Amino acid sequence: MGANEHGVCIGNEAVWGREEVCDGEALLGMDLVRLGLERADTAEKALSVIVDLLEKYGQGGNCMESNMAFTYHNSFLIADRKEAWVLETSGKYWAAEKVEGGVRNISNQLSITTKIDREHPELKEYAKSNGWWDGEKEFDFAATYSYVNTARMTTAGGRYCEGYKLLNKHKGSITSEIMMEILRDKESGINMEGGFMTTGSMVSVLPQQPNLPCIHFFTGTPDPARSVFKPFIFVPSITQLLKTTSPTFGHDDPVKKQPRFQSKPDRRHELYKKHQSAAVVMETIKDKGKEMLKKIQELEKQKISQMESILQNGCLDTNQVVNLFSQCVEEELKIYS
């Protein structure tokens, strides 16, 4: 997931279907998110960037750092100040739905049915040639390209449906705080635990008025129920956010002709490490954990209130907000120390 200086935001989910996933070298969904954000200044342009790259290079490859293979196709939720799109893929084939209103979510299953606003030129013909669609009945992308009666679809369907229910419950009155509350929901599976834990969360406010800034809240840490959503605004002179940047390591040493690192390097950033240590405290020392949780919740409320003031007053002091995220990280670190 991510955002750029033009107010384009993209979220990405793994999906599976009838089409085999390429396990050779290709573009990961995360690559496509980054490239879409790098090259587009609107949501629809980001969609075009992604499908063009998909056609040229394909998608696939192992998404795990370990030796265990984990491959999938991708779905994307793409938004800017004016419009939003859902893009779902199966190999090089894809369908896109323009979101006309209400609420919309994606979650580990194909969800575009008969409302298709853009599509791969061979989408229907390919399905027909594989016997997935008879060419007569109305074309339903999810029904055509999805697995039939599998446990994976049943499980994923539950998470998707629960997410939609949580959004629909607040339709017409969704605030950044409500979105954070939904992302923290563990019962629905939105906030995932276990082997595939939620590793970071993001909420973006994209005002339609061009004079108001887009505000993005990032945790930078796993389990949003125990994390601070920290505000970030794109302004000139933003410096690298060192305490939430994963350390970089060199490639193979050309002189010694052997890897510089014999074991897997620690790629956690400073805030991530402190947050993990604090999570242990929250689990084992209940009173101290409650106090710590209370402080990070107060910090978050303070920052949300500050951002609401900016949006209400329409006044943005770029010198004040240039270090907005970094300062919030420092305040969070103090709570953990």
Image (spheres, rainbow, N blue to C red):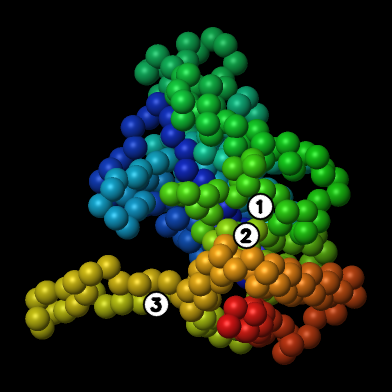
Q: Pick the quarter of the image with the C terminus.
A: bottom right
Query: Do tag 3 and tag 2 residues touch (Cβ < 8 Å)?
Result: no
Q: Please tell me the numbered disc located at residue 183.
A: 1
Residue bearing the label numbered 3: 247
User: Is residue 6 shown to the viewer in this render?
Assistant: no
Q: Residue at x 35, y 72 (%)?
A: 266
Looking at the image, tell me whether mark 1 or mark 2 is earlier in sequence order.
1
Name the amino acid type tagged 2. Answer: Pro
Q: Label 3's element?
A: loop
The x, y position of residue 258, in whole percent, is: 12, 74
The x, y position of residue 52, in whole percent, is: 44, 48
Residue bearing the label numbered 2: 224
In the rendered view, tell whether residue 128 sits above or below residue 227: above
The x, y position of residue 210, in whole percent, is: 79, 67
Q: Residue at x 56, y 65 (%)?
A: 284
Q: Label 2's element?
A: helix
As measured in the structure, the alpha-carbon distance from the residue carrying label 1 to the one carrying label 2 is 7 Å
In the rendered view, tell whether residue 294 sits above or below residue 236: above
